[in-house]
Image: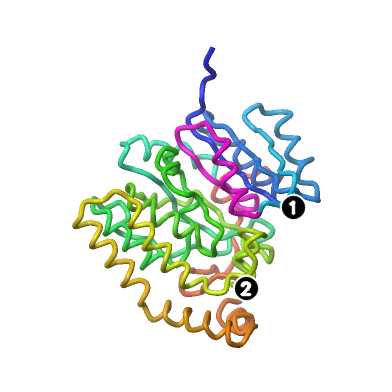
């Protein structure tokens, strides 16, 4: 007898996430759209992550727990949640972020509109340690749902400073055509770039996703240490900017596109690569090889003077007074 598959699979990769994990899982459990499964992949945590997770698996059969015998790195752990998923649609959920109770109820219908929609993501607000809303992300891309693959691709790689799209709702059979999240720095953005070539990426202008700002986030790591976060086996990434150039070109090469769209997509990748920002980053990569530690010194300066809250200020609006999350959606305080 065949087992009925859920409409949505939610993958929760986690490592030592006890501080916020219960809140994140409660937010998932409260979804008003109930046809989903949750795959929690524990990357050999040494804190209370397993105990918290087993509370949920014991009381809700939709939650499943998988534990890695050793830390396999963030990239492989993210991918493992997808490998274990069975749903038609798939979403990654970080163990420190929150989603509103109607997240699935509002994003699933967007993917239901047709197979040409590969991904749906929503407006983002920023929360702090105490789950107070302290700001919002301002960048809204205009053309990622365009009929032209090259225009979608160019819009994302050239105008998206962040990659919150990776926490959107994917069409699983489109995601399965990609290499998923690779071990190199910035591979989440490479993944979404490829998704944008394979289908429409629809922005839902409602605040359904809450990104938590705290000192333990990977975005707080110096760039030269991020490679080990993605994959402990990879060692230090010596030329991460060059790697991203190479990967964006590889994406265009492996997706089936009409000749005209392929040429335009290569053009978009080249325009992105030779932007002033990327040339500056490439220069820093080279400087770091010649003078090890350059990246750390630049990063420390940037953290002190340009990113006091942990995010690029120009891409966010921060509130004068934090807002209670209860004013946006009901939270029982767990």
User: Is 239 rendered above or below residue 111?
Assistant: below
**Residue 302 relative to residue 129: left or right:** left
Q: Identify residue for label 1.
A: 16
Foreground residue, 329 or 28? 28
Q: Identify residue for label 2.
A: 222
Query: Are the residues at dot 2 and dot 1 in contact (C-beta closer than 8 Å)?
Result: no
Q: Residue at x 62, y 29 (%)?
A: 62
Colour setup of the view: rainbow
Q: Residue 11 in the image: x percent, y percent?
A: 58, 42
**SS category of the residue bearing label 1:** loop
Q: Residue at x 36, y 68 (%)?
A: 158
Number of residues whose C-alpha sits closer than 10 Å to that of mark 1, classed few (under 14), some (14–19) or many (20 or more)? some
Q: Residue 96 in the image: x percent, y percent?
A: 65, 53
**Residue 238 relative to residue 202: left or right:** right
Q: Residue 290 in the image: x percent, y percent?
A: 58, 87
User: Is 109 rendered above or below residue 202?
Assistant: above
Q: Residue at x 35, y 52 (%)?
A: 254
Q: Quadrant of the N terminus?
A: top right
N-terminal label among 2 and 1 = 1
Span colored in magenta: 73-99
Based on the picture, tell me whether residue 84 belongs to the magenta stretch: yes
């Amino acid at each position: 007898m065949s087992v009925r598959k859920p409409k949505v699979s939610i993958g929760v990769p986690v490592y030592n996430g006890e501080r916020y994990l219960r809140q994140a899982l409660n937010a998932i459990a409260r979804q008003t759209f109930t046809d989903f499964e949750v795959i929690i992949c524990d990357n050999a945590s040494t804190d209370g992550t397993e105990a918290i997770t087993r509370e949920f698996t014991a009381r809700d059969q939709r939650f499943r727990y998988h534990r890695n015998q050793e830390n396999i790195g963030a990239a492989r752990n993210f991918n493992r949640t997808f490998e274990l998923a069975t749903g038609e649609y798939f979403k990654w959920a970080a163990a420190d972020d929150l989603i509103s109770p109607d997240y699935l109820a509002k994003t699933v219908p967007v993917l239901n509109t047709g197979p040409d929609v590969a991904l749906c993501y929503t407006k983002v607000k920023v929360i702090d340690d105490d789950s107070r809303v302290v700001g919002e992300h301002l960048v809204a891309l205009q053309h990622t749902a365009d009929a032209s693959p090259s225009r979608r691709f160019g819009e994302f790689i050239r105008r998206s400073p962040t990659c919150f799209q990776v926490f959107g709702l994917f069409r699983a059979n489109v995601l399965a055509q990609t290499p998923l999240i690779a071990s190199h720095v910035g591979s989440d953005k490479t993944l979404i770039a490829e998704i944008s070539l394979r289908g429409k990426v629809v922005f839902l202008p409602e605040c359904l996703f809450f990104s938590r700002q705290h000192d333990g986030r990977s975005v707080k790591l110096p760039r030269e240490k991020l490679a080990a976060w993605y994959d402990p086996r990879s060692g230090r990434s010596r030329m991460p900017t060059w790697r991203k150039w190479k990967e964006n070109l590889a994406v265009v090469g492996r997706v089936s596109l009409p000749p005209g769209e392929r040429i335009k997509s290569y053009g978009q990748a080249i325009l992105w690569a030779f932007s002033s920002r990327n040339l500056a980053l490439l220069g820093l990569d080279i400087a770091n090889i010649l003078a090890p530690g350059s990246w750390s010194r630049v990063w420390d300066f940037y953290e002190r003077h340009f990113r006091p809250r942990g995010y690029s200020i120009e891409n966010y609006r921060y509130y004068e007074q934090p807002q209670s999350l209860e004013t946006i959606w009901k939270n029982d305080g767990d």
